[in-house]
Image: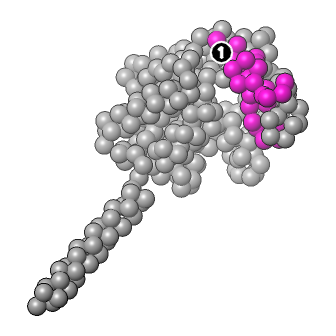
Amino acid sequence: MAVQDELEYLKSLVTQLNEKIQALEAKAKDAVTKPKTPAQHLRTILVGPPGAGKGTQAPRIKEEFCVCHIATGDLLRDQVSRKTALGVEAKKIMDAGGLVGDDIVVGMIKDQLENNKECKNGFVLDGFPRTVPQASMLDKMLEARKEKLDSVVQLVIEDQLLISRITGRLIHPASGRTYHKEFNPPKKPNVDDVTGEPLIQRSDDNVEALRKRLKVFHSQTGPVVDYYKQKGIWHPIDAAQSPKLVWENLRSVLAKSAEGKS
């Protein structure tokens, strides 16, 4: 009888263990398939001067919130290389020495939102809008899609600190690896740690060129920032902090703004 009792006890243990295994497997599967963000969608714009860290943070936003990263410069080059209708039109204008019109750029963004599967959960827009008319056109395009922006996040940093960051930047052309003469120097001066190949400094990473680029950025972006401040969706982030701290602050702002409408 004792043997029978023990057998029954062991059988019940096996049943309980199997049930627990199934519950844990279901939980693990749910964690994999569940979106990484608590929000249904995220639609944001990342604003910042050259060298403020947009190129570092935008891919992290894309990964964390499962959205597409639309960098308008890259988008324009892609459309031209694929010879889309908008790309062909843009190339004609650029070949003639003109500036691509706002309507074409907004059309390219609209095309991404409609046809790029990565955009189904939303987007992070980088490099657009640069002017108030562009911001207004973007709003109208999103309104037609029954959508609107959740947030506009600005990476804020003093020009002088930015200049010291960028003028010391060294790049390995083949891989895109970056170093800094002061903050992140290579093991051997001006030589890539991995390949031993020479590092270069970008031609526009000099004080004079940077001052010009920053002047243009401030004159264009000031009114755009005011436009979004009035809408109550502008959030400043101190970009002088370490990239890790910038990301933590950025992630917190985006999660809250996205949750606020879900």
Q: Position of residue 136 (x, y in %)?
A: 49, 28
Left or right of residue 53, residue 231 in this image? left
Is the image coloured rainbow, by chain, by secondary structure, or in one colour?
A: one colour
Q: Height in image: 45 above or below 238? A: below
Q: Which residues are magenta?
A: 161-189
Is residue 130 visible from the viewing direction of this image?
Answer: no
Q: Height in image: 83 above or below 102? A: below
Per the image, label 1 sits on a secondary structure element best described as helix
The residue that appears at 46% across and 30% down in the rendered structure is 248
Q: Nearer the viewer, residue 130 or 183?
A: 183
Left or right of residue 78, residue 115 in this image? left
The residue that appears at 89% across and 32% down in the rendered structure is 198
Q: Position of residue 103 (x, y in %)?
A: 61, 36
Q: Nearer the viewer, residue 34 or 209?
A: 34
Left or right of residue 232, residue 57 in this image? right
The residue that appears at 64% across and 37% down in the rendered structure is 72
The residue that appears at 56% across and 17% down in the rendered structure is 240
Q: Residue furthest top?
A: 160
34 magenta-colored: no
Residue 212 sits in which quadrant?
top right
Task: Name the residue that disc number 1 marks.
Answer: 162
Please state, as top left, top right, bottom left or bottom right, where the N terminus lies in the image: bottom left
Q: Nearer the viewer, residue 104 or 177?
A: 177
